[in-house]
Every structure is written in C-alpha cells, then in structure tokens.
Image (cartoon, rainbow, N blue to C red):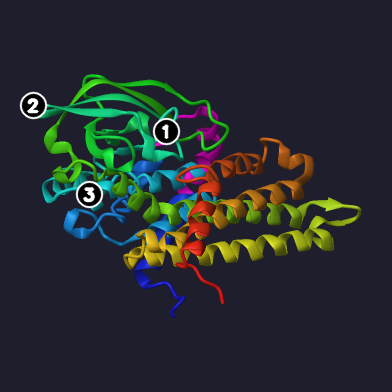
Amino acid sequence: MDFELSEEHRLIKDTARRIAREVVAPRAKEVDETQEYPEDFFQAFKQAGLLGMPIPESMGGTGNGILPLCLAIEEVAKYECGAGLMFVLSGLPTRPIVFGGNREQQQAYLPSAASGDTKMAFCLTEPDHGSDAANLETRAVRDGDDYVLNGNKVYISGGTVADYLTVFARTGGPGARGISAFVVDAHAPGVNIDRTDDKMGVRSVPTAHFSFNDVRVPAENLLGGEEGKGFNTAMLTLNSMRPTVGARGVGLAEGAAGYAMEWAREREAFGSKVLDFQAIQFMFADMAIQIEAARNLVYKAAWNVDRGMYTREHAHHLSIAKAFATEMANKVAFDALQVLGAQGYMKDHPLERHYRDARQLMIVEGTSQVQRVVISRAMIDRNLVYG
C-alpha cells in the first residue's frame, strides 16, 4: 500500500494549483455574483491539457484517470466550487460514451471533448424523477433512421454552454430495462432551454431546464447501437464519478478552513489573537481530522475506480466516500464561518459562499440518503461485512 503521489500526479496537482491561484481565485466572488459561466476558467484548463483525464488515450483523451482528476478538482474548489464542477463535467457526460458507446461513437465525440474543443452535458434528471432514475418519462420512439425524442430534463449543469448532450430516455417498457442513452446535438431543432435556475450556490456554472419537442436523433447516436442499456450505463457513470463530487467537498473544506485560520491568526479579541483561544483551536483540530479522513476516503475511492472497481459490488465504497466528504464539507464550512462570527456572514469574506456552495454537494449525483441506501444494501447483502 503506497500513499505517495506519483510524479505525474504531483505535476497535475501543481498545475491545477497554479491555475486556481492565478485564474480562479481572483474572479471567484465575481462569477458567483454575475452567475456567468467562466469561460476563462475553461480555457485555462484546456490550455493546460487537463480536460481529457477521465477519457482513455485510445478514445482521444489523456487517460490519466479519476484520481488525478480529483487532485485537480480539490485544488480549484478551494477557491470556487463551480470550477471543480467544470472538471467534473469533463467526465460526467463523457463516461456514458466511454462505457456504452461503440468505437465509432467514441471516436466521433470524445477526442474533441478531451481537447476542450467541445463541451458536453449529462441529461438524466427530470421534473418528476431525480433519485428515481429508473422511472424516466422522456421518450425516444424509432422512426425510420431516426429516433424522435420528447420530454424534459432539469438541473442540467453546464447545459447552457454544451455542444452535445448525453440524454437518457425511455425506448421500451417500464423500469430500468426500458431506458436507452443517446448523444444529442444541443443545437438541433426542437432542443430548447426553457430556463436557467437562480441557485443558492455554485452559481458560476448555470443549470438549465431542457425540453425536447419532436427532436430527430439519428439512430447511429443510440449509444452502443442497442436499446435498453442506458440505465446500467448511467449507474456506472455515476458510480465512477462519485469520488469527484467528494473531491469538490475536500477542496471546499480546505479553502474554508485555510481562510478562517489566517483570519484567526490576525484578529484580536479580549486582548489576544482569536487563534490563541483553546475553543477555537479545537474547532480547527476537528476540521483537520474531518478533512484528512475525507481526503483518504476520496483518494481511495478514486484509486478503486481507476482499477476498474466501480460496478455494483464495489459501489458502497464510492458511496461512503461521497457521503462522508460532502457532509464533512458542510460541517467545516459551517464551523469556519462561525470562527469569523458576524464577519463570516458577510459577503466581504468567501466563507458565506463556501457555506452556500457546500450545500449542493449533499444533493447532486445521488443524495446522502441515496448513498446510505447503497451502503446499507451492501451490508444486508454481505458485500460489506464487519466481524
């Protein structure tokens, strides 16, 4: 068991840290306030060659893996959680093509996504079906050489800037077996962005509500060329990407704790520095314990994914990392803000933004409650055994 990062990993981490400090940090407050997609962040990631990490080399990516992707996410999320989400979106919409696409589809869409020449978005959630993904209502009906797509998708991160969408729709009967996956041109006739959300946090990356009205999708865009495989593809994608959401939590917590620590070093109260009070010192100690525990869970989960351990029998380890790290981020953001007292509540400091941003992480890509369903089932089925 080796806990040392490789030279490649350290290079990726250092590159992401440089971009985080030079590009992301100076504009973190601004992009939260304007709610405008930070194209300059994306271009910096593109120029550094960091967008192809979750895509294998054989499919046009750099093939570094999920652990290096988590390292990059952690660095940028220290300053702005949406920047971490932008890295997640290099994998979330492309992994369905990696897992479920045929060679022609992989070569058609993945190299340009890996290079940053195109952007993609992942369209699973519907108005009446979030966690209950097996009961999607969006439907695709075969009509000659096309499928005709009708339905609605909501809360689609990065949807406003996407060139292509990976869309999950029902092609057969009820339940998971009736779901298929497609690559859809985001600008095709009948694809509409009905609105974007005025979100509590992570405001730099807009979430869009899509409607599909008789959208004609070429049959060759059915992932894998076979109906009924979409649900499994979606689950493999979400499983393999869970560590990246945890990494956003780890980075956010590090950023919040670090900022609060430097403030406490300088701020005086009752004739002493705030950091001199043991009550405050213990708060920071608790933050460190939680951050280190979460980081180790996330790194191990990412390492497992890179070893191919993301199928159902391994899913509980990924769920544990995601649930713990995202809940930890909320606790650390809460405590870091508390250290600053009234100042932490003000927008003069980034902690109120960290606090708002952290709340998203316990919801996206499987709520904390869904993660506990996965974990408890593993225990019941004896895939996770103690004693």
Is residue 365 a member of the stretch shown in magenta?
A: no
Residue 86 visible to the viewer: yes
Dot 2: element:
loop
Is residue 25 a member of the stretch shown in magenta?
A: yes
Quadrant location of residue 310? bottom left
- Residue on which the image places disc 2: 144
Count of numbered circles in the view: 3
Residue 39 visible to the viewer: no
Dot 3: element:
helix
- Residue on which the image places disc 1: 37
Name the foreground residue: 161 vs 134: 134
Q: Are marks 1 and 3 in contact (CB under 8 Å)?
A: no
Q: Quadrant of the N terminus?
A: bottom left
Give x and y (percent) for residue 27: 51, 39
Give x and y (percent) for residue 160: 36, 29
Name the foreground residue: 205 vs 100: 100
The amino acid sitting under disc 3 is: Gly
Give x and y (percent) for residue 64: 30, 62
Q: Which residues are magenta?
A: 22-39
Q: CA distance from mark 2 to mark 1?
A: 38 Å
Give x and y (percent) for residue 71: 44, 60
Dot 1: element:
loop
Quadrant location of residue 141? top left
The amino acid sitting under disc 1 is: Tyr
Q: Which mark is first along the chain, 2 or 3?
A: 3
Judge left or right: residue 131 versus residue 45.
right
